[in-house]
């Protein structure tokens, strides 16, 4: 796990109920391949996502994900306009390209009395094709913005993944050792690892010179939606700072 895994850019109020479902909705359509013969799409929410989804804007982020938006790049100021357009027109452009009918009342379903087997935050997406066939897949939002498909192992970063990670750590002691070896403070390691608004490490990042719309909005409004993990991490940082143990190492 890297410091970047602890901090996600995205609209709130919940990484598991907004960020995860948006990522899952978009991933589903991307993995479906060609959408040219699609005639409809359906999203079904289960368990906790169904019970508290409306309060956490899960319904909105699922729709946005199907429309191709990503948590780090969605413009919060444009969200309501996008949703209103879908509602008014009764159709949406899947991944921003192929238009299909969409009725929020019938194509976004809340199964409040049913949970899927692998996690309380379950989602089932169904793509209907012109020949009568369907493509269906189940995803789980497992917290912190991480997701996994049914049958996949976990949903959090794999320590054996081929992509190199700067300053990987599982304990504060390991993080402090990275700081000592690199002569960097915690904030400097965060910036170096790309865990800031101006980085491009997340899929679809704008690049180092451009902050994401979601991040710019949080700057203007002061709104944040940290995961429980990042909150604990911040508290550890603050506690260590008070004792002087993670000030810049020399």
Image: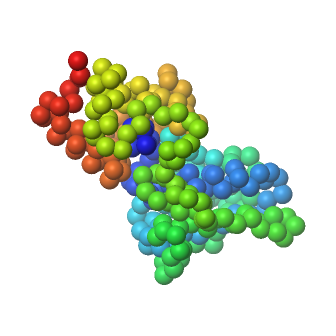
On the image, the x and y values in percent for residue 235 come to: 22, 44
Q: Residue furthest right?
A: 131
Q: Image point 79% across, 59% down: which residue?
A: 38
- For the N terminus, give its image quadrant: top left
| Nearer the observer, 210 or 179 | 179
Asked whether the viewer can see residue 66, the reply is no
Q: Image point 31% across, 43% down: which residue?
A: 171
| Nearer the observer, 26 or 190 | 190
Q: Quadrant of residue 101?
A: bottom right
Q: Image point 40% across, 32% down: which residue?
A: 167
Q: Image point 59% across, 60% down: which residue?
A: 152
Q: Residue furthest left?
A: 243
| Picture mark count | 0
On the image, the x and y values in percent for residue 224 come to: 34, 44
Image position of 64 with respect to 171: above or below: below
On the image, the x and y values in percent for residue 181 come to: 32, 23
Image position of 179 with respect to 141: above or below: above
On the image, the x and y values in percent for residue 61 come to: 52, 55
* Horizontal arrangement in the rendering, residue 235 relative to residue 32 (left or right): left
- For the C terminus, give its image quadrant: top left
| Nearer the observer, 208 or 212 | 208
Asked whether the viewer can see residue 88, the reply is yes
Q: Residue furthest bottom?
A: 113
Q: Quadrant of residue 203?
A: top right
Structure colour scheme: rainbow
* Horizontal arrangement in the rendering, residue 26 relative to residue 156 (left or right): right
| Nearer the observer, 35 or 85 | 35
Image position of 234 with respect to 55: above or below: above
């Amino acid at each position: 796990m890297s410091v970047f895994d602890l901090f996600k850019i995205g609209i709130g109020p919940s990484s598991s109920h907004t960020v995860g479902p948006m990522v899952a909705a978009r991933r589903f359509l991307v993995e479906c391949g060609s959408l040219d013969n699609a005639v409809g799409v359906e999203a079904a929410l289960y368990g906790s996502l169904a019970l508290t989804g409306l309060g956490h804007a899960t319904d909105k982020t699922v729709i946005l994900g199907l429309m191709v938006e990503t948590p780090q790049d969605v413009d919060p100021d444009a969200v309501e306009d996008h949703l209103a357009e879908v509602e008014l027109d009764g159709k949406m452009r899947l991944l921003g390209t192929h238009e299909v009918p969409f009725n929020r009342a019938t194509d976004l379903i809340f199964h409040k009395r049913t949970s899927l087997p692998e996690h309380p935050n379950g989602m089932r997406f169904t793509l209907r094709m012109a020949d009568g066939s369907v493509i269906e897949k189940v995803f789980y939002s497992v917290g912190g913005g991480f997701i996994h498909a049914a049958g996949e192992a976990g949903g959090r970063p794999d320590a054996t993944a081929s992509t190199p990670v700067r300053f990987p750590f599982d304990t504060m002691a390991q993080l402090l050792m990275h700081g000592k070896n690199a002569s960097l403070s915690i904030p400097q390691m965060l910036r170096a690892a790309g865990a800031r608004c101006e980085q491009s490490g997340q899929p679809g990042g704008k690049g180092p010179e451009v902050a994401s719309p979601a991040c710019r909005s949080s700057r203007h409004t002061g709104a944040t939606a940290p995961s429980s993990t990042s909150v604990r991490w911040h508290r550890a940082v603050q506690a260590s700072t008070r004792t002087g143990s993670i000030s810049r190492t020399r």
